[in-house]
Amino acid sequence: MTARSMAAAPGRHNNFNLIRLALALLVIVSHAPEMLDGDRSRELLSRLFHTLSFGELAVDGFFILSGYLILQSWLGRPQPLAFLQKRLLRIVPGYLLAALLSAFVVGALGAGGGYYGQFWWGGLARSLLLLDTPVTPATFVGSHYPSVNGAMWTIHYEFLCYLTVLALGLAGLLRWRHAPLAVLVLCLSLWGALALGAWPALAGAAREETLLMLRFYSCFFTGASYFSYRAVIVYSARGALLALAVLLAGLTQPASAEAGLLLGGAYLLFYCAFAAGGPLLRRTQDMPDASYGVYLYGWPVGKLLAWYLPTISPLALALATIALAYLCGRLSWHWVEQPALRFKSQAWNWRASASASATASVAASVAASAPALAAAQRKNDANADC
């Protein structure tokens, strides 16, 4: 396969849809044994390397891809309201429906009587506002990870990354090509310092939260850096093999696992997105983008299956969850996410029409008042001559 630059793959000539779907399915594969066992003793990647799980690897992959696409979105239309509208319409409708179904349907199916009467409505509203896991009464009591949606918490961090891009854009920093790399270096430096014991006053939950945020920022701005340097990054099969070797070597040690993912895994993701496969593979770019729905519904579907079929095997749980979550993802795309995106297009068409109408009105007014303006100008010129 010949080497290829990202700049040579414009528009939708990529495999992003398929990669996102694969990452969402990896999360399900990772969660299935953990739901049954309460640990990672049968999680496949953890058993192999004893570092990252497939779930962690997939979530980091989502953030890497997101960094690339979100920076592309901002630089394509660096307008705050347009950017926020696109981000909200893409992420909130699907999240909101999945969160409400998780809270009011899935939670009730895993709880006893009086479930609805125990809701803390303020807590639920706050969790929805923050795009976090919905706060519910106790459910799935006695099971491992008794949550109505144990995958949804990452959406909150994803949106924080969007807001960070917005802030950097408003500050004018993203006009500097090296800004994403500078942010990445800063995040990695802080992450490494904290991991080595710096700032001991930052302890407990606050420290873990900071480390998690720096991990996600590092992944996100790795992807953003790939976009910034897309014109000079070249893909080749040899480069992909080297990246795979770096990733596998990094996964062998806890201290180097994330570094291996950022150094090797990111290149592999974008190699697969832009350079891997032929026409048959690229036909998947026209697939319905069910990945977001698969991610949102994978946990509640799997949790219900594990709750009502406690003797189910991890493989059977993973396969059944994949089938049902993919169905939910397709329905979410067709009935919620895609209509929301059409609304975005309609809103911008309306704005464009309104802007065009306003421009035409101003032009007509100027044309109508031109004689009077010309007369006034002639009068001013005459007064100046006196």
Image: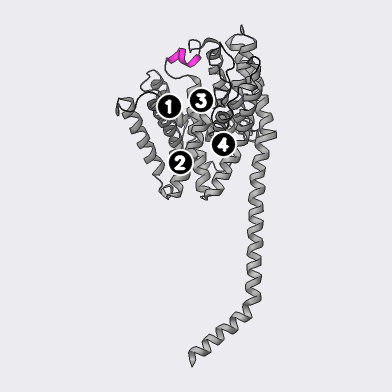
Residue 131, quarter of picture = top right
Mark 3 and mark 1 in contact (Cβ < 8 Å)?
A: no
Give the residue at mark 2. 164
The residue lying at 55 percent from left, 87 percent from top is: 379
Question: Is residue 270 something that shows in the picture?
Answer: no
- What's under tag 3, amino acid-wise? Ala
| Mark 2 vs mark 4: in front | 2
Give the residue at mark 4. 14
| Mark 4 vs mark 3: in front | 3
Q: How far apart are marks 1 and 2 (CA)?
A: 22 Å
Q: Does the magenta stretch include residue 48?
A: yes
In this rendered view, identify the residue nearer to me: 298 or 232.
Answer: 298
Q: Which mark is residue 58?
A: 3
In this rendered view, identify the residue nearer to me: 379 or 143.
Answer: 143
- What's under tag 1, amino acid-wise? Leu
Residue 137, quarter of picture = top right
Q: Earlier in the sequence, mark 4 or mark 3?
A: 4
